[in-house]
Amino acid sequence: MGQLFINGLALGSIYALVALGLLLIFNTVQIVNFGQGQLLMIGAFFGISAVTQFELPVTAAWGVTVLGMALVGIVFMVLVYFPLRGRPPFLVILTTIAMGVILENLALIVWGPLPVSLPSPVRGAPFRFAGMVVSMHQAFIFATLTVVLVTQYLFFTKTRFGIMMQATAQDLNMARLVGIRVNRTIAVAFALSAILSGIAGLLVAPIFLAEPTMGGSLGLKGFIVSVIGGFGNLPGAVIGGLLLGLIETFGSRYISSNFRDAYSFIIMISVLIVWPRGLFGEKSSERV
Amino acid sequence: MKKQQRLLAPLLVAAALAAPALAGDGYALQVLNIAILNCIVVLGLNFVTGWTGQVNFGQAAFYGLGAYTTAIATKAGLPWITTPFLSALVALIAALVLGMPTLRLRSYYLAMTTIGFGEIVRLIIVHWEPVTGGTSGLRAIPGISLFGFTVEGQIAHFYLLFAALALAALVAHRIRHSSLGRAMLATRDSEIAAELSGVDTVRTKILAFVIGSIYAGLAGCLYASSIRFISPDSFTGTQAVLFMTMLIIGGMGSIPGCIIGAIGLTILPELLRFLGQWYLVLYGAGVIAVIVLAPGGLASAYPRIRQRMAGFAK
């Protein structure tokens, strides 16, 4: 019981990271990126290639992945969002999905369909905490989520660039008028978002194996978390993510593991019926 | 333009009616039959995405629901005549359950709900083995039979499916030019402006979604009873992406565009088998290129070229 709780929280932390990546893009340009799960998958495979083909130590592989993902994020933004600024938003939904299809099939060509594993950057025996066994990797996942949250908070509230990004999110045209290079801040938002999904990919790969088709369901979990927590709501994304991880873990233990992916979806529909703006409220409403 | 269209339409119909003679009674004709079914599914998707601007990634799942409903019903001994109604009813109920909570909200809610729905339908088909046959699917589904008449052979099925497509296109055309059709376009272009002009956008979106799902459900019914074998592979998320690709490349919002896209992209993979995995990469790139460069798809290319030509003539 307690063990399931820890496992659920670890899974949930990864969902929360995916949702945080979605949130960064959503809060900057009001767009939901349907290729986020595939970005995560690419991150996992960057790490795996760095370790297995270039024989880098795992920590160096993390560094390479973070840099690589920043680049991928910017390319993503230039191809998928940039040409469609100001056009109906459903077109961007379609291009992000198309980009996801491209990434998934490129990964199948480059890395093949077989699942591969990535070692965790931390080693050592699991330890006991309040009667529950916590593996080093699980502890590392919790630590990573905490570091990401703190860094993100400091970046957005204490640094000049972070405040510029917040201004862009609040009103793009106003931000441009006061001299912020809006396109640059948007590019950074996409890069950071891709980095967050890349980190989530690096964290997932040691628990479940990485395979090119893993992105679809993980991306969907990110959306479901965002719906539960309320789109664009940061605490909502974190709490929603942890909640979903717990629900899935307990659901597959006590109900049926075949329908693991169905629980989250049923919960999302129920949340939408009862609280259409999520448990913690949506950040902003549609602008005219 | 009008005069040319009037000349073009009977020519195309004649060419289509002659197709079985050219394709023969083999695999090629079966591909063509599937292409026609895909046309109906994509015409349905066009109501939701092309005209109303809502992204539906569950079209393959609705298609699958229709197909499995028909297969299970006829295998249980129900007469064929009941199956189109049953398939349509199941698709309608599913569409209402998904659409009512999500279509009140912003466009991405429907997109992610339908992606999830597709996944759930697939899970149910794969894991509910006693009824759905699991991953190996259902074989020997009873064929179409109406009042004692039965349809036998690929060629007869081709003409039947062709008639169904003609009816589907006609209904779509009539709806497009009704007040509901105009409300759909207004909703797509600007929901706020549509609301201000007195359009009930939520009702319009739900109706478009329901009509589109019924199209897919009926196409599924015809699929099950004309191909007579179904398996979960035909109704996956990848298939949903392919339907969307057909719509976008053919031309969102255009009935001939849907048909060109569906037929073209059903036959193309058969010819491009040597590309293997690359063809999906190309599809993705094609979608982005079309949306960015020519949002009207192939259907918009013809009038554009004509305009250019007219410009040169002067």
Image: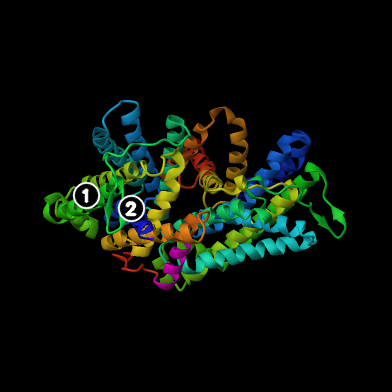
State the image coordinates of residue B231 (x, y, percent, origin top left): 65, 47
Magenta part mainly helix, strand or loop?
helix
Task: State the residue in front, A263 or B270.
Answer: A263
* Residue that carries the numbered disc 2 in the rendered image: A10
Task: State the residue in front, A247 or B118.
Answer: A247
Q: Is residue B61 visible?
A: yes
Q: Is residue A280 magenta?
A: no
Q: What's the chain of the residue with tag 2?
A: A
Q: In the image, A270: left or right of B118?
A: left
Q: Is residue A164 above or below residue B303?
A: below
Q: Quadrant of the N terminus of chain A?
A: bottom left
Q: Is residue A270 magenta?
A: yes
Q: CA distance from mark 2 to mark 1?
A: 36 Å
Amino acid type, residue under disc 1 in the picture: Val
Q: What's the chain of the residue with tag 1?
A: A
Residue drawn at x 32%, y 41% is A202
Task: State the residue in front, B67 or B152.
Answer: B67
Q: Secondary structure at mark 2?
A: helix
Label at residue A182: 1
Residue drawn at x 70%, y 44% is B33
Quarter-of-image position of residue B154: top right
Q: Is residue A264 above or below residue A71?
A: below
Amino acid type, residue under disc 2 in the picture: Ala
Cβ–Cβ under 8 Å for marks 2 and 1 = no
